[in-house]
Amino acid sequence: MAALAAKKSQIRLNDALTTLPGIGEKLSAALAAKNVESIQDLLFFIPRKYQDYSQVLEIVKLKPGQVTIQAHLNNIKTRRVRRGLAITEAIASDASGSVRIVWFNQPYRQTSLKSDVDYYLSGTFKLSNRHLSIINPMTELVSDTVLNTARIIPTYSESKTLSSWTVRRAVAAALPLASSLKDYLPNYIIKKLALLGLAQAIKQIHFPDSASELAKAKKRFQFDELFPQLLANELSKLERQKEVALKVDFKLELAKTFVEKLPFKLTDDQRRVIWQIYQDMGSDLPMNRMVEGDVGSGKTVVAVMSALMAMAEGYKVAFMAPTELLARQHAKTIANLLKPLGWDNHLVILTGGMKTAAKKEAIKTADALNGALVVGTHSLLTSGVDWSKLALLIIDEQHRFGVDQRMALQKQAHHLPHFLSITATPIPRSLALTIFNDLDISRLKQMPSGRRAITSELIAPSDQVKLWKTLNDELKAGRQFYVVCPYIHPTEKGDQVGAETIYEEYSKRFKQYKVGLIHGQLNALEQASVMEDFVNHKLDILVATTIIEVGVDVANASVMVVYGPERYGLAQLHQLRGRVGRGQYQSYCFIVLSDSLGPPLRLRQFVNLNDGFALSELDLTLRGPGAIYGKLQHGKGFARLLTLDDHELITQVKSAVQLFIDKKEPLAKYKNLAEAVAAAQQMTYLN
Ligand code: ADP
Ligand code: MG
C-alpha cells in the first residue's frame, strides 16, 4: 500500500498514460487517437453527455426507463438462440421483490457474476419478449466508488477500440492527480464569481456528485473557454490605446477623383466601408479592422482607396498577400486602379523570389518615394525597407490575424500601424461579437451588379453524365476548369479521390487538352510554374489539392469540380467555389459525392446558398460555436462547452476580465493564464 502511494506521487501530469495503473498500450493508443496523450489530456477529456442512474430504486417501485437497483443475482444462465446471438438471463432480487435481467451477447456475465453478493445494476427497464426486464445493465459490486452504476454516468467520445467504460476506468485512475493541477485563474476571481476550483471542476465533470455539481463544473469550463480570449482582447485593446499611429487626413478631392475615374460605380457597401476606414485612419488611435466580403465583392478597391489616402499623406503602406503569385496578381490589379490618377508609380512590388539586385532596387525606390504602397508577401517583414513612416498594414487572406506581422512591423516602425485585414471567410456574427469584441468588422454584403450566380450541383457517383457533358462543352468553348481533391494520393480505403488518380483519369478522358497537377509536395517554384501555366492558359485543366483555395484569379476558368466534399467545411467549399465566376462567363461548381448514400444535409444546403455570410451562420448552427472557435484557434482543439447565448455567463466573464485589469497585476504572475492568453491572441482564419 505504502509502495503504491509512493509510486503514485512520482507520476506527473505530463506523463504518458501508460504510467497509470491499469492503462496498457492498447487503451493508450485508442485514447491517443482522440488527442489524449498525457494524464493531463485525459483529465481534460470532457464527457459528451451523461446518464443519470443515481437513484437506487426498490425493485417493486421500478417504472420503465433508466433504472438502478441494488440486488442479488440468481439463476444465471446463457443460451445460444441462433448463430451470433447469446442471451444471458438472471433473476435479481432485493428485499422488495425480483426482476428479470437480460444481457444480449455478453456471455462472460455467466462466469463473472457471483450469486451471493450485492450488486448495483444500472440499465433500461422495459418489455423484452413480453416480460418487463432490465436490459443490458452495467454491473458493479456495491461500494462508494462505483464508476458505471448508481451515479450520474459520463459518456465519452467513443471509437471502435474505445468504449466509455474503459475511459471511465482510465479517468478514475488519473483523477487523484487532478489536485496537482495548478489552477490558472487568480483565486480572487474564483472566489468572487463562486466558481469551482479547477481540480474540483475536473472531478465533477467526470463523476458528478449531483446534477447541480455537474452544472457548476460545466460552468467553470465554459468560463475557461471564454475568459482567456476576452482577457486577451481587453489587454490588446489597452496596449493599442497606448500606441500612437500615424494620422491620415481625409482628402475629399482625392477620393472624389479616384472614384470618378473608376471603370465602375462603387456599391453602397463599398462606400460605407471605405468611409469607416477613413474615419479610423483619421485618428492616431491605431485602427484594428477586418473587412469581410465574398469573393468578387470588391475588397481590393476598398484596400486601394485606404492605401491611397495614406500615400497622399507621404506615408508608406504595406500590403501582404499569402503567396508570391497572389502578390504579383494584386500588384497588377492595384496598378490598374492607381493609373488614372498617376499614382501607379508609387507602387512597389517586393517578394522573396525576386533577384537580389531587383530587391535592392525595389527597396531603394520604396524608400525614396514620398508615399509608397509596397506589395509583397511575408518577406516584407524582413526586407529592410525603412518602415518608420508606415501608416497602414493591409493583410489579405492570411492564415493569421496578423498579430505577429503587426508586432514585427511595429518594432521597425517604432509605432503601431493602422491595421486592415481582408478576408472572404466571415466569422459568424455571434462569434465575432463575443469572441472578437476587440476587432472592428466591416461587411461587404452587396455584390457589384451584373454578377451571375454560380450554378452549384451535387453529382452522384452513379450519374456523372451531366458533369462530363458540361466539362466538354466548356472546354470546347475555350474555358478552363479546376478539379480539387482532398489529398494527393488515394487513401488506403481505395477511394478514388487522390489528386494523382484523378489527374490520370482526366488526362485519359480529355486527351486533346492539357492537364496540370499541383499540390503541396511540389516545391514553391514548381507550384508557381504550374500556376502560371494555368493563368496563361497553357493548361486547360488544373487538378489540385486545396492549395489553390486562396485568391487565385483566372477569369477564364468556369468550372470547379470538387471531390471528397465531406472532407471540407462549408467555408472552405465556398472559397473553392469562389475560384470560378470571376469573369463574364456563366460558371459551375460540381460537388462529386463519394458514395450513393444520399448527400448530407449540409451539402444539400450548400448548393442552394451562394452567400458566404449565410453559409457561415449555417456552419455555426450545424457545428456549434466550439468547433468553429476551435478551428480559429488552429489545432487547439474543440472548445467543447463554449456557448455564446448564455448572457449571464458572458457578463460574468466580462466582469472577471475587468476585475483582473483593475488589479493591475502583471499577467506573467499567472504562468498558465499568460499561456492561455497568448494562445488566444494567435487566431487564424477560417479557411
Ligand atoms: P475580392 O473581394 O474577391 O477581392 P476584387 O476586389 O478582386 O474582389 O473584385 C472583383 C472584381 O470586381 C474586380 O475585377 C473589380 O475590379 C470588380 N469590382 C469591384 N468593385 C466593383 C463595383 N462596385 N462594380 C463593378 N465591379 C467591381
Ligand atoms: Mg481579393
Image: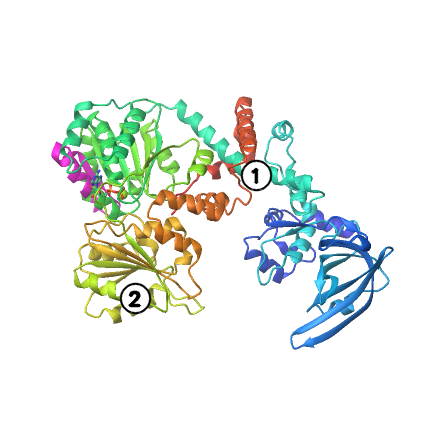
**Front position among marks 2 and 1:** 1
Residue 85 as seen in the image, left or right of residue 667: right
Find numbered disc 2 in the image and state the secondary structure of the residue it sits on: helix
In the image, residue 267 sits, relative to residue 634, either above or below, namely above
Mark 1 Cα-neighbour bin, 10 Å: few <14, some 14–19, many ≥20: many
Residue 171 as seen in the image, left or right of residue 465: right
Along the line of sight, the residue nearer the viewer: 414 or 232? 232
Residue 384 in view, yes or no: no
| 681 in magenta | no
State how far apart marks 2 and 1 are (Cα): 46 Å
Residue 441: image quadrant is top left
Residue 684 as seen in the image, left or right of residue 558: right
Find numbered disc 1 in the image and state the secondary structure of the residue it sits on: helix
Along the line of sight, the residue nearer the viewer: 666 or 507? 507
Which amino acid, mark 2? Tyr
Residue 499 in view, yes or no: yes
Residue 527 position within the rendered picture, expressed as x and y whole percent measured from the top left = 27, 56
Color encoding of the figure: rainbow
Which residue lies under the disc numbered 2?
Answer: 503
Which amino acid, mark 1? Gln
Which residue lies under the disc numbered 1?
Answer: 222
Q: Residue at x 33, y 36 (%)?
A: 443
Residue 163 position within the rendered picture, expressed as x and y whole percent measured from the top left = 63, 59
Residue 135 position within the rendered picture, expressed as x and y whole percent measured from the top left = 71, 62
Residue 176 as seen in the image, left or right of residue 186: right
Residue 80 position within the rendered picture, expressed as x and y whole percent measured from the top left = 71, 76
- Seen from this angle, which residue lies furthest bottom? 83
| 338 in magenta | yes
Respond yes or no on whether mark 2 lies under 8 Å from ligand 2: no
Which segment did they paint magenta? 332-356
Ligand 1 image position (quadrant) = top left
Q: Are marks 2 and 1 in contact (CB under 8 Å)?
A: no
